[in-house]
Image (spheres, helix red, strand yellow):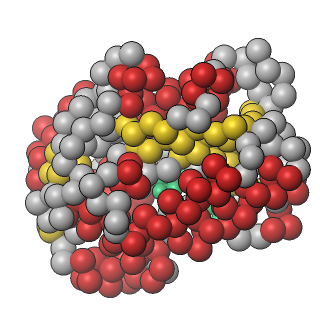
Amino acid sequence: MTTTPILLLGGLGKTGRHVADRLRDHGVPVRLASRSSEQRFDWYDDNTWAAATGLDTAYLAPPYDPAGLERAGQFIKQAAAGGLRRVVLLSGRGVGGPGREFEVYYGQLALEQAVQDSGVDWTIVRPSWFMQNFSEDLLLHDQIVAGELRWSTGDGAEPWIDTEDVAEVMINALLDPRHTGQIYSLSGPRPLTLTEVVAELAAATGRPVRYTALEPEDHVAELIRLGASREEAEALRDLLAVIRLHRSEYVSDGVQQVLGRAPRDFTDWARRTARAGVWSA
Ligand SMILES: NC(=O)c1ccc[n+]([C@@H]2O[C@H](COP(=O)([O-])OP(=O)(O)OC[C@H]3O[C@@H](n4cnc5c(N)ncnc54)[C@H](OP(=O)(O)O)[C@@H]3O)[C@@H](O)[C@H]2O)c1
C-alpha cells in the first residue's frame, strides 16, 4: 500500500469527496488541491501549480468550461515534467457517445488527448450526468426545495449515475495498475427524463416538484441573471443540448465492468437522500 499521498485535484467536488473518503478508508493518504483546500490550487493561477507537483499519482476533476479544460491540459504537461507518473481523469460520457461530434466536447477530448500524450500512465473515466446534481448543485437543490426545476433538457432522458459509483470506479483505477490505458464509460441503470426525475423526487420527499422546460437561450439568460458567466452558462446549455436532442438515451456498462455489479438506481438514491433531509425546506 502506498504511503505517498495521492493528489486530488477537485477533491472536494461531487465525486472527489467520495474518492477522498474511500482512499482514507483504505489507509491511503491524500493531498487535496483546489481553491478552498489547505493546499490552495487554482486552474487559472499558475503560481499555485508548483505546490501540486512532485507527487506520483493524481485524480483530476477538471473544470467543464473550455478555458478551464485547456488550463488542465497545460497543468498535466507541467506535472508530468515534474515527476507525475499516473493520472485518473474524470471526463464525460458524451465524449465517446453518439453526440461526440458536438463542439462542446472538443475541450474534454483535447484534455483526454493531453493526458494520453503526457507520457504518464492514465485511466479515463467517462460518466453520464450525476444524480447528485439534484442534491449538491446549489441552484438545482434550491429549485427542488421551491418545487420547480427549471432546465433546458426538453423531454430528453439521461441515465443519471450516483457519484458513489463513479468514486468506486476511480478508487479501483487509482489503486490497481491493471486499469492503466483503459477508458471506461459509466452510467446509471436507466435513462430518465426530467419529468420522470421530478416525479421520483416528489415521491421521495412527499412534496410536489414540477419541471419547467426552458428554451436554451432563456436558460442562458436566466443563469447569467443568477450570477453565472456567459461562458459557463453557454457551456452548460451546450452540454444539456445533448440530452435535449435525445443523444444520451443509452446505458453504459463501465460500473459492471470495473466493479462487477450493477450501478445504483435513481429511486434508491432519491429515497436515501430525502431521508437524510437534504431537500428539507
Ligand atoms: N456534474 C455532472 O453531472 C458531471 C457528469 C460527468 C462529468 N462531469 C465532469 O466532472 C468535472 C467536475 O464536475 P462536478 O460537477 O463534479 O464539479 P463539482 O462537484 O462542482 O467539483 C468541482 C471541484 O473542482 C474544484 N474547482 C472548481 N473550480 C476550480 C478552480 N478554478 N481551480 C481549482 N479547483 C477548482 C472545486 O473545489 P473549490 O471550489 O475548492 O475550488 C471542486 O473540488 C467536470 O469536468 C465535469 O465536466 C460532471
Q: Quadrant of residue 40?
A: bottom right
Quadrant position of the N terminus in the picture: top right
Compared to residue 241, the image places residue 247 above or below, namely: above
| Front-lying residue, 280 or 72 | 72
Left/right of residue 240 with respect to residue 200 in the rendered view: right
Seen in the picture, residue 242 relative to 194 is either above or below; the reply is below
With 270 as the anchor, is 170 left or right in this view?
right
Q: Answer whether residue 259 is visible to the viewer in this image.
A: yes
Task: Report the front residue among 199 and 66.
Answer: 66
Q: Position of residue 244 (x, y in %)?
A: 19, 64
Relative to residue 251, is residue 105 depicted above or below? below
Residue 163's x, y, as percent?
Answer: 43, 37
What residue is rendered at 81% in x and 52% in y?
79
Task: Say whether residue 37 is left or right of residue 248.
Answer: right
Choose between 35 and 251: the one closer to the eye: 251
- Ligand 1 image position (quadrant): bottom right
The residue lying at 43 percent from left, 51 percent from top is 92
Give the residue displayed 19% in from the left and 48% down from the top: 249
User: Residue 90: x percent and y percent?
Assistant: 53, 46
Quarter of the view holding residue 100? bottom left
Q: Please, is residue 143 above or below residue 26 in the view?
A: below
Compare residues 180 and 172 and report the one nearer the observer.
180
Residue 52 x %, y %: 82, 50
Q: Is residue 149 visible?
A: no
Q: How many marks?
A: 0
In this picture, residue 240 sits left or right of residue 190: right
Residue at (64%, 39%) from the top-left corner?
122
